[in-house]
Amino acid sequence: MTFKFNNAYINETATVTGPYESAGPLGKYFDLCYKDLYFGEKNWEEAEVKLVTSAINILKKKSGVEADVLIGGDLLNQIVASNYAMEEVKGSFIGIYAACATSTLGLILGASLIDGGFASNVITFTSSHNTSAEKQYRYPVEYGGPKHKTTTFTSTGSAAALLSNVKSDIKLESGTIGKVIDSSIYDVSNMGAVMAIAAADTIYKHLKDTGRDIGYYDLILTGDLGIYGQKILKEYMHSEYNIDLKNYNDTGVMLYDLKTQPVYAGASGPVCAPLVTYGFIFDEMRKGKYKKVLLAATGALMSPVMVNHKLSIPAISHAVSLEVML
Amino acid sequence: MNQKYQEIVKKNSPKENVLINAVVAFITGGIMGIIGQALIDGYTTWLDISTKEATVCMLVTLIFFTCLFTSLGFFDKFVNFCKCGLIIPITGFAHATMSAALEYRKEGLVTGIGMNMLKLSGAVIIFGVVSSFVFSLLRMVVGLI
């Protein structure tokens, strides 16, 4: 299902990261970088709450606007980071979960509220925290069990965007809501393979619904497929839909320096796609390097319980089309 | 089940370096064995105790240093490098238990550490007890014959 938006713009963005992200190649594009993983809090879960509140406070300061509605979510059980942050922010809040595709789902929902005339300012945000996610989904952080090459590294940070009907240089032109797709993959350390098929489906759907050719976009971005997921997506798109992804990149590959940082196949986490997009890609768009960008954030809907039940991991991908208005 | 997709995934997924990992584990595991034996020899000489008692002292020493290094935050890097060279000996068990204890210490003494400390290593205890029971039983039956 693809929505076309007439009047939805991204007015302002805020990005907050941890130490690994600021040490990466895109470090200078972020608004605030914390030096450690606790940020002065007692535990990682509260640290993630602080990430979200910091991002929203920065966004409010930069834009000077109070939002009518906030839409957001994160990776933790019961999306606690978002919920507890919203307790402090005190605004009407819609909590969402789409794993690492939360950012684009939030953008689509926010733009729908604005285009439908229900709200004039919507903040959409997401967060992830490396160690709180490791603790919940994988092994204890200090446990040094060997990792597969396909493992991805959950990024630490929070990204927020202010959407409104006031014209700005970045337009949210349309959005495609994806389907939950069975990847038939059981390997919890190969999330790229789990999500690539969902990304392929959503990108194909988007092009079909809008009647566009892949060449319409200057850049196709996927969320956090990593180096191997990227290869899988390219090959699958070619063999299944006969689409060649040429101007294509993956935010999971861009966030870190894969050669020097210990991140295996690349970055993951809900915040990976918006960090790279709001920080780096928007900057490039304003400089005129890209005019039309399709961002397909991808989420592996993994639950350790369901994996123990010997069920394969489902995935989802939501895509947004972003255009620069110069 | 999408057969074609499975094939594409398989084709594009990297191979793990099984041989190199095995060699590294063999060498580092061997070094661990040498350290263990050196400790036993040392304890029997210096403390004038039997080999059986010295073995217990050796295990306690290895567990102590594993837990200390895990808490100091660098033992995970050793394990990641040595892999089964450090996971199979008692160091692996101590490391798994200690890392879980560190992880959950902020959730309280009972609800945190108490309930989660054996999250990873609990399976080792359960199946260690079960398999030792089975093998003792087998040994007894063989002995009767």
Image (spheres, rainbow, N blue to C red):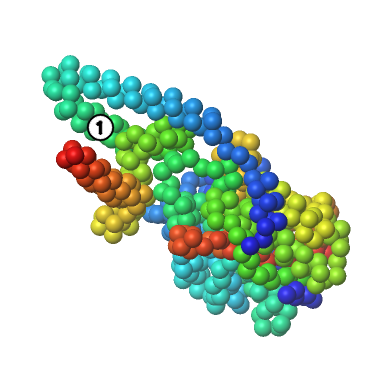
Figure check: A49 above or below B22: below
Task: Give percent across and percent down for residue A252.
Answer: 65, 50
Marker count (numbered): 1
Q: Please give the name of the residue rendered at 17% of the width and 16% of the height, measured from the top-left corner.
A: B45
Amino acid type at image mark 1: Leu
Q: Please give the name of the residue rendered at 61% of the width and 64% of the height, measured from the top-left corner.
A: A182
Crowd around label 1: few <14 · some 14–19 · many ≥20 (10 Å): some
Question: Which residue in the protein does label 1 denote?
Answer: B59
Q: Please give the name of the residue rendered at 34% of the width and 52% of the height, measured from the top-left corner.
A: B119
Viewport quadrant of the C terminus of chain B: top left
Locate residue B61: give its quadrant.
top left
Figure check: A114 above or below B112: below
For residue A78, side relative to residue B102 (left or right): right
Task: Give percent across and percent down for residue A72.
Answer: 57, 68
Locate residue A159: give its quadrant.
bottom right
Task: Give percent across and percent down for residue A63.
Answer: 66, 65
Tell which of A199 and A106 is nearer to you.
Answer: A199
Q: Residue furthest front?
A: B145
Instruction: Say whether residue A199 is visible.
Output: yes
Helix, strand or loop at disc 1? helix
Tell which of A51 and B49 is nearer to you.
Answer: B49
Task: Give percent across and percent down for residue A93.
Answer: 54, 75
For residue A240, side relative to residue A19 (left or right): right
Figure check: A317 above or below A257: below
Q: Please give the name of the residue rendered at 34% of the width and 34% of the height, measured from the top-left corner.
A: B89
For residue B97, side relative to residue B58 (left or right): right
